[in-house]
Amino acid sequence: MSPEENETYLSERREYEKLHRDHTREREKIYRAKPEVKAHRKKMRQERFQRIKDLPETLAYKRKASLKRTRSLKQQAISAYGERCVCCGENEFEFLSIDHKTPEAKKRDISRWKSHGTAGAGLYAHLRKEGWPKEDYQLLCMNCNFAKGKYGICPHQFSLTQRFNLSTEDILKI
Ligand SMILES: [Zn+2]
Ligand SMILES: [Zn+2]
């Protein structure tokens, strides 16, 4: 077939398919449902996946998709837990994280979900599945979370008298 003939053939075929689109689709559906065609298509898909799965573009795409998912889950968690640090009121997205209110809650989560489920996307996904339970979780900023973890209580929660061991009279003199 010459290129011109081929072009004519193709354009006629396109015309035909346009006119008989429904019919063509139906035929295609029947064709694709055949077990041997199904198996072949599956094999092609798998081969394609094997070819592209370790390409830098694929890895970059996966990484971007995973970051996007984490960010979206974190946004949902922040909305569900009141948008700001319960200790100091910080509301900057990057500074906020979910805090286990008690060491027992943290221990329980480690045994339930292993460490991948006790922070970040893993934790957000679990909490969403459970309807954002409030009993054991709260929103804290990194500063308050760190101080609470290290000292047991965030300095924001001390009154001046407790922090510096002063009496009320002493404070009035300052
Ligand atoms: Zn805070
Ligand atoms: Zn604080």
Image (spheres, grey):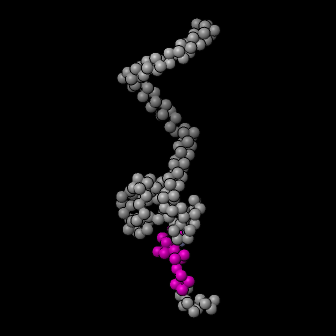
Nearest to the observer: residue 115 or residue 83? 83
Q: Residue at x 52, y 35 (%)?
A: 52
Q: Across the whole image, how many numbered discs are drawn on residues?
A: 0
Work out whether 49 lies above or below 106: above
Work out whether 150 lies above or below 114: below
Q: Residue at x 53, y 82 (%)?
A: 159
Query: Magenta segment: does it hold 146?
Result: yes
**Image check: 170 left or right of 35?**
right
Quadrant in which the C terminus is drawn:
bottom right
Give coordinates of residue 126: x percent, y percent: 42, 54
Q: Residue at x 52, y 71 (%)?
A: 87
Residue 160, quarter of picture? bottom right
Work out whether 117 lies above or below 11: below
Work out whether 148 lies above or below 124: below
Give coordinates of residue 136: x percent, y percent: 41, 65
Query: Magenta segment: does it hold 4?
Result: no
Asked if one can make out residue 63 in the rendered structure from this viewpoint, the answer is no
Quadrant in which the N terminus is drawn:
top right
Residue 55, quarter of picture? top right
Which segment did they paint magenta? 144-163
Q: Residue at x 56, y 46 (%)?
A: 64
Q: Main secondary structure of the magenta part?
A: helix
Give coordinates of residue 25: x percent, y percent: 46, 20
Give coordinates of residue 80: x percent, y percent: 48, 58
Asked if one can make out residue 104 in the rendered structure from this viewpoint, the answer is yes
